[in-house]
Amino acid sequence: VRFDPHLSAQSDVATLEKALEHAEAVVIATAHEAFKELLHPNELKKYGIKVVVDGRNMLKHLRSDFAEAGIVYQGIGIA
């Protein structure tokens, strides 16, 4: 499922919350400011997310929080 708040025509759902409902993993391809709060480990844990691949490395400061939440975090990009 794709979601981008700035490209609604190319998104499969209207909100990030809808995109997370049946997901097990998240791939971050854009560093939108709106994602920083919504993709916090505590929020993702509520949806049962198990893996985050951060292509922008925008959540690297939360590595320990991801580990504590039991979510595998892999940052691979530059923010």
Image (cartoon, grey):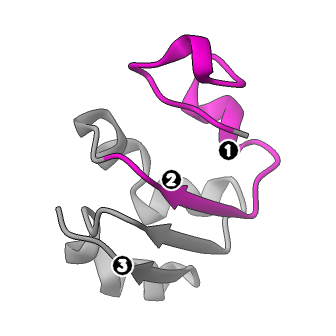
Q: Secondary structure at mark 1?
A: helix
Report the side of 67 relative to 63 (left or right): right
The x, y position of residue 5, in whole percent, is 43, 22
Which is more N-terminal, label 3 or label 1? 1
- Residue 27 located within the stretch drawn in magenta: yes
- Badge 3, how many Cα within 10 Å: few under 14, some, many 20+? some
Q: In this view of the protein, which residue sits in the foreground, 17 or 52?
A: 52
The x, y position of residue 65, in whole percent, is 36, 78
Q: Quadrant of the C terminus?
A: bottom left
Q: Is residue 58 above or below residue 70?
A: above
**Circles 2 and 3: CB distance less than 8 Å?**
no
Looking at the rendering, which quadrant does residue 77 occupy?
bottom left
- Badge 1, how many Cα within 10 Å: few under 14, some, many 20+? many
Q: Which residue is mark 3?
A: 76
Q: Which residue is mark 2?
A: 43
Which is more N-terminal, label 2 or label 1? 1
Q: Which residue is mark 1?
A: 20
- Badge 2, how many Cα within 10 Å: few under 14, some, many 20+? some
Q: Secondary structure at mark 2?
A: helix
Residue at image coords 28%, 47%: 31
Q: Is residue 68 above or below residue 44?
A: below
Task: Tell me which segment is drawn in magenta.
Answer: 2-30
Residue at image coords 76%, 54%: 23
Q: Is residue 6 above or below residue 32?
A: above
**Circles 1 and 2: CB distance less than 8 Å?**
no
Q: Secondary structure at mark 3?
A: loop
Question: Which amino acid, mark 2?
Answer: Glu
Closer to the observer: label 1 or label 3? 3
